[in-house]
Amino acid sequence: MAKHNSENKRDTINKMKNDIENTEFNMRQSDKMIDSIDDEIVKSELELRNFRREQSLRNMKQNIENEYDKENNIKNNLK
């Protein structure tokens, strides 16, 4: 039996939240490395990675908001 659509949306939202947590963890780890590394090239590469992670985080958070909005719209239309 297939999952109900709202269950699938919750699973999707939970996966996105997990992705956000992992990305934030990776950013913190990179920040620690940046502070401890003297090689400017490696620092620059890590800073660039974190910049891309920041962009990804914004997109992931926006996607979660969009999923919540979709779910709320569906619930409101069913009332």
Image: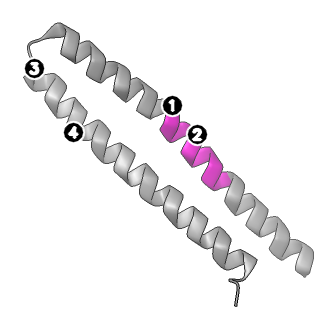
Q: Dot 4: few (<14), some (14–19), or many (≥20) neighbours within 10 Å?
A: few
Q: CA distance from mark 4 to mark 2?
A: 21 Å
Q: Position of residue 75 (x, y in %)?
A: 81, 75
The kind of secondary structure element at disc 3 is loop
Above or below for 68 versus 77: above
Q: In the drawing, what numbered circle is on residue 29?
A: 4
Residue under the point 20% across and 16% down? 42
Residue holding disc 2: 59
- Identity, as a three-letter code, of the amino acid under mark 2: Asn
The kind of secondary structure element at disc 1 is helix
Quadrant position of residue 4: bottom right
Residue under the point 63% across and 45% down? 62
Residue holding disc 3: 37
- What predominant SS class does the magenta segment belong to? helix
Q: CA distance from mark 1 to mark 3?
A: 24 Å
**Would residue 40 be found to the left or right of residue 14 on screen?**
left
As for residue 40 lying within the magenta part, the answer is: no
The kind of secondary structure element at disc 2 is helix
Residue holding disc 1: 55
**Would residue 29 be found to the left or right of residue 18 on screen?**
left
Q: CA distance from mark 3 to mark 2?
A: 29 Å
- Identity, as a three-letter code, of the amino acid under mark 4: Gln
Above or below for 22 versus 27: below
Quadrant that contains the C terminus: bottom right
Asked if marks 2 and 1 touch (Cβ < 8 Å), the reply is: yes
- Mark 1 or mark 3: whose residue is earlier in sequence: 3
Quadrant position of residue 9: bottom right
- Mark 1 or mark 4: whose residue is earlier in sequence: 4
Q: Position of residue 5 (x, y in %)?
A: 74, 76
